[in-house]
Amino acid sequence: MKTMLICLCAFLAAASNVALADDIGQQREQTFAHLSVSHDWDGPPRCNPGSGGQGSAWSPQSGWAIVSERVAINSENNSRITLQRRAGGPGFPNVGDVNNQFELLATLARVTKNEEAAKEISALRDRWIRARENDTQDNSLYAEVWAGAHGNCFDRKRGWADATFYATTRYVGDSQALADEVARLRNKYFSGL
């Protein structure tokens, strides 16, 4: 008799959807999927090996970028376990966008000779840019497990795969967070202009 057990447990981070500019550059590792599959032989009187798999796609919340990913193999026999980074997922402002937004404020600080503003603007721009180091717009992951029964009709062996998938993400801010940060600095130092 064919026995098949497929279990898919997807875990979403419990983090809030609202991140502050103070969080720029903060990293966290989270479990995004646990996949398990098991396949046995049909029979008797039939003698057919079972096989199959399960997959799970995942993307971080808006404003977060995938920094790295890893898989922990809990148990396996005659299996394939894969984890791929893919295009897609939430976008975020690139280094050029960040530079352009902060350069407008830096120019205002120079023109008004506001050294305090210039220091804070420069420090925040550097922090926003550092948060983007080694980040790509490939901001989606796909995890997959596959297993197949093996052996022969007289020596039947079950196949299985059980793995936990993790992603490390960094808060890089989305377009709205960048606009909010720029508006906050403009209001703090240049509200009269």
Image (cartoon, rainbow, N blue to C red):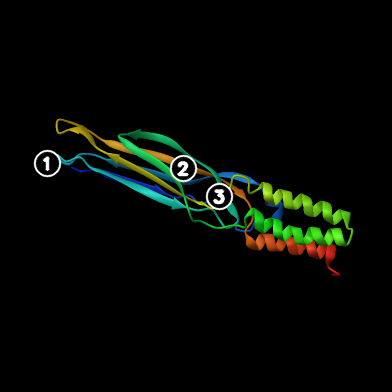
> For mark 1, what is the residue?
46
Identify the disc placed on residue 22. Answer: none
Q: In which quarter of the view is residue 134 placed? A: top right
* Residue type (three-letter) at the residue carrying disc 2: Phe
Residue visible at 43% across and 52% down? 57
Q: Residues within 10 Å of mark 1 (few under 14, many from 20)?
A: few
Q: Nearer the viewer, mark 1 or mark 3?
A: 3
Q: In the rendering, at what x and y percent does residue 89 appear?
A: 51, 56
> For mark 2, what is the residue?
165
Can you say whether 152 is above or below 61 in the image?
A: above
| Element marked by disc 1 | loop
| Element marked by disc 3 | loop
Can you say whether 112 is above or below 120 in the image?
A: below
Q: In the rendering, at what x and y percent does residue 132 appear?
A: 63, 49
Q: Residues within 10 Å of mark 2 (few under 14, many from 20)?
A: many
Left or right of 45: which side holds 138? right
| Element marked by disc 2 | strand
Residue visible at 78% across and 60% down? 105
State the CA–CA distance, disc 1 to disc 2: 36 Å
Residue visible at 38% across and 34% down? 75
Q: Residues within 10 Å of mark 3 (few under 14, many from 20)?
A: some
Left or right of 32: which side holds 37? left
Residue visible at 75% across and 52% down? 124
